[in-house]
Amino acid sequence: MSKYKDIADDIRAKIKNNEYTFGQKLPYEYVLCMSYHCNKETMKKALEILVKEGLIIRRRGAGTFVKDYDPTMESATNKFARGLTGKYAGIKEVTSEVLEFEVVPADEVLSKKLQIDIGDFVYHIIRLRFLDKKPHLIDISYMPISLIPNLKLEHLKGSIYEYIENVLKLKIQSCHLTINAALSTPLEQQYLGLKEYEPYIQEEQISYLSNGAIFEYTLARHHFADFEFQTIVVQQ
C-alpha cells in the first residue's frame, strides 16, 4: 500500500479513537511530515483523502482542523453509498442492462480521479438502470481491477456493491458527490428519451473503501424531469 494511504489510515484511526477530537487543530504539516517520516507531497495526499471523507477541514491561514465525527454518520453515509439496488430494496425492482463492459488502461483523467498510475487497467462499464422496468439512469463507471478483481457480467446485471461487500469482503466507507448538468448526447437521447436540446442531470461520484482507497469513479446520468436531490443543512 502507498505510504500516503498508510498515513491517512493512521490519522483516521486517531480521529475515530478521539486522539484527535472535534475542532482540534492538527499539528502543522511539517510536524506531521517529521512524525511520519515522509515528504510534504506525501502528507498532502494523505490529508486530501481525509478532507474528501469529511473528517478534516482546511481553513486558509489557520490550519487543518478535525470536523465533528459521529460514528452514527457512517450508517447514513453507507445508505447513500450502497448503490441503487440497496437504496430501493423492498421498494422498487431494480434491474440493469449492460451496454458496455471492457477493460481499458487509465488515461491521465482517470489516473487522477482514481489515484492510480496512468496505464493501470480499469473496468469501463456502462449500464442502463431500470426502476420497475422504467429507464431510470445511465451509469458510466470506472473501477481499478487491482481493487475489484474478477468482476463478471452477472455482477453487473445485479449489484456490484453487493459483490464488493459480500464476496470481496470490502467495506464501502464514503463518497464524494458533485452534481452538474449538460446537454444530452445520443446516448441519453436513445436510452432516456431526451431530445437534442434537453439536458441530463449528472451525479459525479468518487467512492472510497474503509481503507481510504478509491474503488469507483461513476457518472450517473438522469433525465432532468426525474431527478430530485434532497439534503438537510444544519448550522453549527
Image (tube, helix red, strand yellow):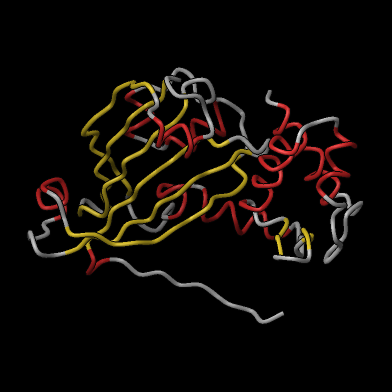
Expressed as whole percent of the image width and height from the top left, the position of residue 84 reads: 40, 50
Q: Among all residues in the image, which is located at the extreme bottom? A: 235
Is 166 on the left or on the right of 219, as rendered? Answer: right
* Residue at 7% from the left image edge and 59% from the top image edge: 196
Expressed as whole percent of the image width and height from the top left, the position of residue 71 reads: 75, 56
Expressed as whole percent of the image width and height from the top left, the position of residue 77 reads: 59, 56
Expressed as whole percent of the image width and height from the top left, the position of residue 88 reads: 41, 55
Q: Nearer the viewer, residue 94 or 25?
A: 25
Q: Nearer the viewer, residue 148 or 112?
A: 112
Q: Is residue 187 above or below residue 67?
A: above
Is 29 on the left or on the right of 58, as rendered? Answer: right
Q: Nearer the viewer, residue 129 or 219?
A: 219
Q: Is residue 89 above or below residue 4?
A: below
Q: Quadrant of residue 179?
A: bottom left
* Residue at 69% from the left image edge and 37% from the top image edge: 41
Quarter of the image with the C terminus is bottom right
In this rendering, the count of numbered labels is 0
Q: Nearer the viewer, residue 20 or 164?
A: 20
Is 176 on the left or on the right of 24, as rendered? Answer: left
Quarter of the image with the N terminus is top right
* Residue at 36% from the left image edge and 38% from the top image edge: 141
* Residue at 70% from the left image edge and 60% from the top image edge: 58
Is 142 on the left or on the right of 186, as rendered? Answer: right
